[in-house]
Image (cartoon, rainbow, N blue to C red):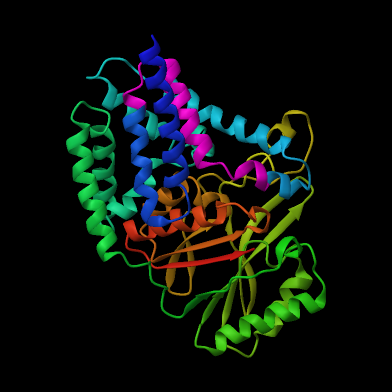
Amino acid sequence: MRRDYIRSTLLIFASIVIGVVGWSGHVLLLPVALGFPVLWSTSQSRSVAALVSAAYFLGASRGLPQGVAAFYSSNIWPGLLLWLGASMSFVTVHSVLWTKYPNVRPFRYLLAAIVMFIPPFGITGWAHPVTAAGVLFPGWGWCGLGLMKAGLAGLVTRTWPAVAIALIGFWLWSAAIWTDAKLPEGWRGVDLEMGASLGREAGLQRYRDMIATVRGAASDGARFVVLPESALGFWTPTVRRLWAGAFRDGDASVIAGATVLDATGYDNVLVAIDGKGGRILYRERMPVPGSMWQPWRSWFGESGGARADFFANPVVSIGASRAAPLICYEQLIVWPVLQSMLHDPDFIIAVGNGWWTEGTSIVAIQRAATAAWARLFAKPLVITFNT
């Protein structure tokens, strides 16, 4: 009994380490997360598998309590409750599908992985080990994703040491030749450091400063300049006229985050602006659950909260190109990027507003995950954040 207790404790501790290291924000460390399936499969019981799953997920998402506390300007308790609540779907899926029968285990784990891809469980499907496919198999696309699934299945069998050695070989090979995703020709992402004021202070001088920043980027040869999530605040006719007028005499186009508000709620969007005017380019498929997306409001006849478009607009047309947009939270989960890749876009646009994550690795994790997906499918990447 004592031996089982010690073994379970070691599995839980190792799962925490794997979650922390694999999701540290360094893209080449993402394959460390592949240790989780091994620990899950070697758990002695369903309860231990649940604890191992919780340890991995909580270790990977450790920055959430501090980030939520900063976002709401409150103490850490709301963040802790959200942190624990969000882990429930991951833990529930992996504990229910755990089995003591080795021959069934690979199918059960693959099912758990797929369930955590897509809604409803995929809504909180952070820290998915499949994200490491972009590091192990850069440029292999859907074949690389298939190999990743086969590798995950192999890691929960008795032959897992041989599978792990093979995957480590791919990892070392990839690390030796690794290059970051390139920018699309004529594109540039502009990072901002405006903190919580971005999107909240909408004075004329703020807009003039951002317009000058965009013009500076355009003067370096960029035809399309991307600004972070919420850069323009509320998207109104006045804001549209101001920005379109600023670029009436130039060839540059601006892609920027904004908010479209109506009587029932709001949409988190990307807008495209050029000399001809402005238009809504993309509506976020999955806003942040809880702080933005609050579906329970409608159950009580209340309005408010961000709308989730789930499977809408996976790709958008910009000039002669087709892009896959990802706004903030969509970079942490799996189905938005895979849905977009089904349409074979020319490149990925990833924007975020991460001022509230100061002191955490959340933005670094978003960047690493997006970079891994871009490398898996060999897509150029434009990425920009406000901090």
The one of 249 and 212 positioned closer to us in this rendering? 212
Residue 56, position in %: x, y?
46, 34
The one of 87 and 330 positioned closer to us in this rendering? 87
Residue 299, located in which quarter of the rendered image?
A: top right
| In the depicted structure, whether residue 316 falls above or below residue 165 | below
Report whether 188 appears left or right of 288.
left
How many numbered circles are shown?
0
Q: Is residue 65 magenta?
A: yes
**Picture residue at 62% right of the left edge, 45% below the top:** 288
| In the depicted structure, whether residue 157 falls above or below residue 357 | above
Q: Is residue 88 magenta?
A: no
Residue 257, located in which quarter of the rendered image?
A: bottom right
Report whether 49 appears left or right of 291.
left
Question: In the orientation shown, which residue stands out farthest toward the right?
Answer: 203
Report whether 294 appears left or right of 179.
right
Q: Main secondary structure of the magenta part?
A: helix
For the magenta stretch, what is the residue range? 40-67
Residue 240, position in %: x, y?
72, 72
**Picture residue at 33% right of the left edge, 54% below the top:** 134
